[in-house]
Amino acid sequence: RAGLVQHIRSVVWRCSVAFRIAAMSLASSFVGRSVHEVGTEGAPRLAKDEDYAKAVCEAWAADVEIKENPPKEQRPYVYDDAGVKLHGRLVYPSSASGAGVVLLHTGAGPQDLFLQWTAERLAARGATVLIADMLGDNSGLAWDAQWSAETRKQLTDDRALNRRRARLAVTELSKVPGVDPEFIFAIGYCFGGRAVLDLARMGPEAGVRAVASFHGVLDHGAIPDGDMTSPKAPTILICHGDDDPFTKFEARAAYETALRNISARWSLIAFGGVKHGFTNPAQAFNSAPAFCYDALAAKRSWDAAMAVFGEFKSEFTGASKTSQGSSCTLL
């Protein structure tokens, strides 16, 4: 009974903190500023709006794997790239397997409830996780579309810088006690999905065993490829919505050709009729026609990524036990 009470308290604490920081008020005990206000370094904005925060926190609180294996700790992690302060977050598992995972964010930046939930899902499987910061965002500034677009442009225009930031995150995670540098992996979403693919194409210099790109932008970019035939070159998994308007069929085909030409070890799963952002339950409330949550694609893509990572670290294996709610097409 005492264990059950402690577990309930931990779940309530985790989500109540998330709601307070994101300014959710689902109950009278949740008080704070609006999610539409600018955050601070100590209390960053973590969601687009109340619907976003509610959808992610409900999925987070219902996550069976996290209930069974809650993380030991989450804490901010500040690091530096040539004078630019980057504001990441470390999530420690209760029982470390030695594996590490770098999470690379969407255009909404690193201060995102969805990333914190995802990090805890990985920690439940024994991984130490670094939510990396590609933008220098300490307070949720990237939730402002204009700030995000202007800041991301530096990285989309300079793919070498984009790759360097991703590789730096791997280096930082490798320094964390309990992480075996031989078993680091990377996951990226949207903007971050392109970044993990740029990282992977460094070959053995990438410092990761495998990467998974979820609804990542697929374009090769003017950056050199490493030796993808090396046994230490990363395995690549791409999970893509076939109806994603940000990567047309022609661009996808061109990217596949580029991967073949460098003899990469890669797989691509395309989900028919699925749009951009399909992994995030909050996209069920996104009115933009390009976005849509798909519960089945979210589960299948996650399980596929865990299977790929599990080829190197067995703790990742096993299908997700989590029901993530209804797809936006069903709402």
Image (tube, grey):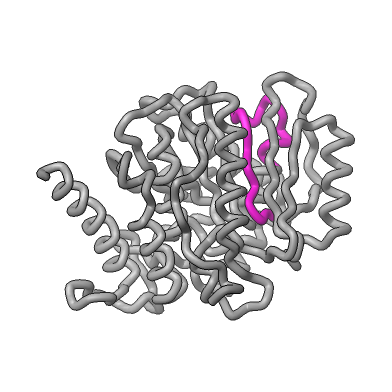
Residue nearest the viewer, comparing 109 with 286: 286
As for residue 208 lying within the magenta part, the answer is yes
Say above or below: 197 vs 251: above
Residue sitting at 46 percent across and 67 percent down?
141
* Image spot of residue 33 (x, y percent): 29, 76
**Total count of labels:** 0
Task: Specify whether 30 is left or right of 233.
Answer: left
Say above or below: 101 vs 241: above
As for residue 267 lying within the magenta part, the answer is no
Residue sitting at 75 percent across and 20 percent down?
230
Say above or below: 116 vs 261: below
Residue sitting at 29 percent across and 60 percent down?
15
Task: Specify whether 297 is left or right of 35.
Answer: right
Q: Considering the image in quadrants, where does the N terminus appear? A: top left
* Image spot of residue 159 (x, y percent): 71, 49
* Image spot of residue 132 (x, y percent): 49, 47
* Image spot of residue 134 (x, y percent): 55, 51
Q: Which range is magenta?
A: 198-216
Residue 131 visible in the shown view: yes
Residue sitting at 59 percent across and 40 percent down?
305
Task: Specify whether 122 is left or right of 299.
Answer: left
Residue 77 visible in the shown view: no
